[in-house]
Image (cartoon, grey):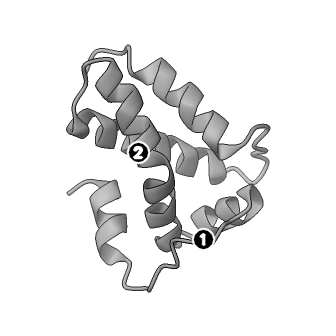
Amino acid sequence: MSIFELLMKESAEIINYCEEYTDNEIIECLRNRQSYVVHWLSDRYMPMIRLMIYQKGGTNEDARDIFQDGLIIMLEKLDDKKFNLTCKFKTFSIVYVSTLENCPR
């Protein structure tokens, strides 16, 4: 089972999908491995990622893989306390998907 599936499965908390989080709140939640923020990020950014991947001929599975890859990279970067996000999460997502969608799998 992938890290994405594990994080999605382990969350038993009730998620308020309408709630907004600042980038700093997202960073702290991810650093603390609070899985509800993964659900929130997925709900927030998967439609955009899926659309970008579909437009390039990819599948829903490709979109999930790219989201998962981005999440793993973000978690690795956040483990470094010196990490400083210099753009919005949405910008990071768009740039990351744009670079990964052209990579062979």
Residue nearer the viewer, 84 or 63? 63
Locate residue 99, reporting x and y percent.
Answer: 49, 19
User: What is the number of the mark on residue 32?
Assistant: 1
Q: Residue at x 34, y 56 (%)?
A: 4
Q: Residue at x 79, y 38 (%)?
A: 86
Looking at the image, residue 82 sits to the left or right of residue 71; the answer is: right
Using the rendered view, name the quadrant where residue 101 is placed. top left
Q: CA distance from mark 2 to mark 1?
A: 25 Å
Locate residue 92, reporting x and y percent.
Answer: 62, 35
Residue nearer the viewer, 51 or 104? 51
Using the rendered view, name the quadrant where residue 42 is placed. bottom left
- Badge 1 marks a residue whose secondary structure is loop
Label 2, residues with CA under 10 Å away: few <14, some 14-19, many ≥20: few
Rendered position, 85 above or below 43: above
**Do the numbered discs 2 and 1 sit on residues whose CB atoms are within 8 Å?**
no
Q: Amino acid at mark 1?
A: Asn
Locate residue 24, reporting x and y percent.
Answer: 76, 60
Q: Residue at x 74, y 61 (%)?
A: 22
Residue at image mark 2: 47
Q: Residue at x 25, y 25 (%)?
A: 58
- Badge 2 marks a residue whose secondary structure is helix
Q: Which quadrant of the rendered structure holds the N terminus?
A: bottom left
Looking at the image, residue 81 sits to the left or right of residue 38; the answer is: right
Rendered position, 99 above or below 6: above
Q: Earlier in the sequence, mark 2 or mark 1?
A: 1
Using the rendered view, name the quadrant where residue 74 is placed. top right
Q: Which quadrant of the rendered structure holds the C terminus?
A: top left
Rendered position, 48 above or below 39: above
Q: Amino acid at mark 2?
A: Pro
Give the mark toward the camera: 2 or 1.
2
Label 1, residues with CA under 10 Å away: few <14, some 14-19, many ≥20: few
Locate residue 5, reporting x and y percent.
Answer: 28, 60
